[in-house]
Amino acid sequence: MTSPIKPPFDLESATAKVQAAEDAWNSRDPQRVSMAYTEDSEWRNRAEFIRGREEIRAFLARKWAKEHEYRLKKELWGFRNNRMAVRFEYEWHDDAGQWWRSYGNELWEFNEEGLMARRFASINDAPILESERRILKPERA
C-alpha cells in the first residue's frame, strides 16, 4: 500500500487524490475503498448516515450488489488546505436492466495523514438508455 497523499493540497496533489479515489471506487472493492477513510470517518450519502470503516464496507457491499457494471468519473471542483469539493457521475444498471446515470457533488475533509475523515455526498439519479452511456470501462486496468 502506498502512503496517502497528505494535506495541505496543491493542484497537483489534489488532482492525484481525486484520481486515486476514482480508481479505488472503480475497483468495486469495499475493503480497498474503506482504507482511504479514518476508522471513525463520518459520511452522509444521500439520506443515509454512515460512521466508521465497518459501516463503510457494509454500505459499499450493498451498493455494488445492486449497482451492476458500475463505472465512475470524478472531477476536482475546488480545494483548500485539507478540504476538497468534487463533482462526479457514475453509470450502472439495476437487476431489471435499466441503466442509470447518477450525478453528484461531494465535500471531503482529510486528517493530517491524508485519510478522509468526513464525506458528504448529494446524489441524483437519471434513467438512461444503454446507448447513452458516456463512462465505459477504462483502457487502463
Image (cartoon, helix red, strand yellow):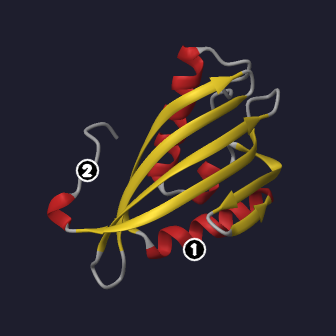
| Tag 1: amino acid | Arg
Residue 136: numbered disc: 2
User: How many callouts does the rendering have?
Assistant: 2
Labels 2 and 1 touching (C-beta < 8 A): no
Residue 68 location (% of width, % of height): 37, 70
Residue at (40, 55) in percent of width and height:
90
Q: Which quadrant is home to the C terminus?
A: top left
Q: Is residue 73 left or right of residue 61?
A: left
x, y percent for residue 116? 73, 40
Other residues around mark 2 within 10 Å, as few (<14) / some (14–19) / many (≥20): few
Residue 58 vs 77, above or below: the answer is below
Residue 13 position within the rendered picture, expressed as x and y whole percent measured from the top left: 59, 19
Front position in the image: 18 or 83: 83
Q: Say which amino acid is labelled 2.
A: Leu
> Which label was assigned to residue 77?
none
- Where, quadrant-wise, is the N terminus in this rendering? top right
The relative height of residue 96 versus residue 84 in the rendered view (above or below) is below
In the current view of this chain or complex, which residue is farthest to the left? Answer: 131
Which residue is located at x 69 percent, y 69 percent? 48
Which mark, by number, is residue 62? 1
